[in-house]
Amino acid sequence: MRKNLIFMTILCFLLLFVGCKTPTDVKVYEGTEEVTVTHVEVERTAVVTGIDLETNEIRFKDCMDSEDFRLIYHGGVSVLNNYGRDIGISGIGNGSVVDVLYYEDTEKIVSITINDKTTVLKGVTKFSADSDNGTAKYKGTSCGLWDEVVAYDGDKRLDITEINTEDQVTLNIFAGKVVSVVVELGHGYVRLSNQDTYVGGMVEIGYDVIVPVTSDMLVAVREGKYTLRIYNGNYSDSKPVEVKKGKEVTVDLADIAVPTGTVTFNITPAEATLYVSGEEQEDFVYTNLYGTYGIRVTCEGYNAFNGSFKISQPVNTFDIELKPNEDLTEETTEETTETTQTTTESTETTATESTGGSGDGTGGSGNGADGSGGSGDSGDTTEVNTAVSGTEGSNTTANTITVLGPVGAGVYVDGDYVGLAPVKFPKVVGTHTITLYKTGYLIKSYTITAADDGEDDEHTFPELTSVFDALEE
């Protein structure tokens, strides 16, 4: 009896266990049919225009038809480089050209692969784009520019004209055209102060910024730490400078100003007329920067004297005696008048501003008897008559370029101040950097291309961003 009870207990337990193993993976209900869902896969070559991992959404622009579209991303998506190696979602970014495979009905991404037909150029400098002509240039190389080209600085979308020639960028070239530009190193701005003694000389900043020194200049320079070198005649000096993206740094040159000296000329006869670098001097005392200058002394009934002299000390004295023109010929010497120089080293002279060292009176060129010199400040005018420097091989045309706005912003062309917008200046063929400056606003630069097409150009740029608005963002 006891054995039967044990047997019945085991049998009940087995029947209960077999009942829990009934399949539940497929449920069939009366009046329904089993349906198999088939996803249609679509593959497109596109530029990545946005990645939002919070919403699991990636935005693209199709390289063929320029269509903007969005797809759903999830952690199971494989992201591969063009060698088939998994690089993860961090391996792509805005501007990347990819082949994206996804389900048409659900818009869910299946895989993303870096497009292997795209040429990726990194570390590119001197890039410029001409959207009107659909061309791009970098380091002397030309190629096509996609009509829908996109540009990025990190997550920030840029207009292609905001890419400065001083920026270091990555180019993605698909089907022979630049489809995206990604900034690797951006640019900041360098302003000089107390540079008067260097006006007419040259300043070198960074890798390839070599520009004339003017009385008001604001130069775009790639971000980084550099040695600023500045020259005027035979005199040069340097200072360290750190350029930060989007920021302005002022370099004070007061402590490395070019020294000046005073020259007293003892001229016989006393009624002679003295010319230094082509300009007549009212008396026989001349003060200017250290350097070499051309000299001419004339007097009726005497042979004219032509030569040069060098200012290399605070106080200098030169003796010049004209000879009667018995043979009606001029005296010309290639030797400097230092052969008759006497110097008083113990006398201290206060440096004063040059008034005649160069042909245009801006001072300090020290380039001898030809009388040429540096350019002067154009001032706050609505029309500038001086030529604007351009790229290599450029030339000034009979046409003009007008910057209409933003109204009231200071306009710098290739680092040289030309006035407040609206302002007009000569049209020089080539690529130019237009920098806009206004107190209390962020500095902004744009790249324009001027063509020799016989037409005047006009540009209106977006309003500048207030510093306070930028802080709130």
Image (cartoon, rainbow, N blue to C red):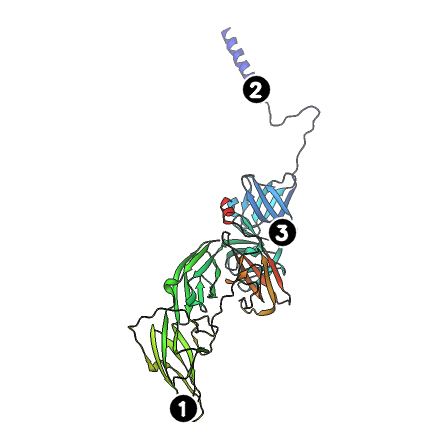
In the image, 27 versus 78, the foreground residue is 78
Residue to which mark 2 is pinned = 18
Q: Mark 2 or 1, which is nearer the eye?
A: 1
Q: Amino acid at mark 2?
A: Val
Q: Mark 3 or 1, which is nearer the eye?
A: 1
Sequence-wise, the earlier of marks 2 and 1 is 2
Give coordinates of residue 455: x percent, y percent: 64, 65
Residue to which mark 1 is pinned = 324
Residue 226 seen anywhere in this rendered image of the structure: no
In the image, 219 versus 69, the foreground residue is 219
Is 186 above or below relative to 291? above
Q: Amino acid at mark 1?
A: Pro
Q: Residues within 10 Å of mark 1 (few under 14, many from 20)?
A: some
Residue at point 43% right, 58% down? 250
Describe the element under mark 2 as helix, strand or loop. helix
Q: Quadrant of residue 198?
A: bottom left
Q: Which mark is residue 63?
A: 3
Q: Which mark is residue 287?
A: none
Give coordinates of residue 246: x percent, y percent: 48, 53
Q: Amino acid at mark 3?
A: Cys
Describe the element under mark 1 as helix, strand or loop. loop
Is 250 above or below relative to 350? above
Residue at point 45% right, 74% down? 358
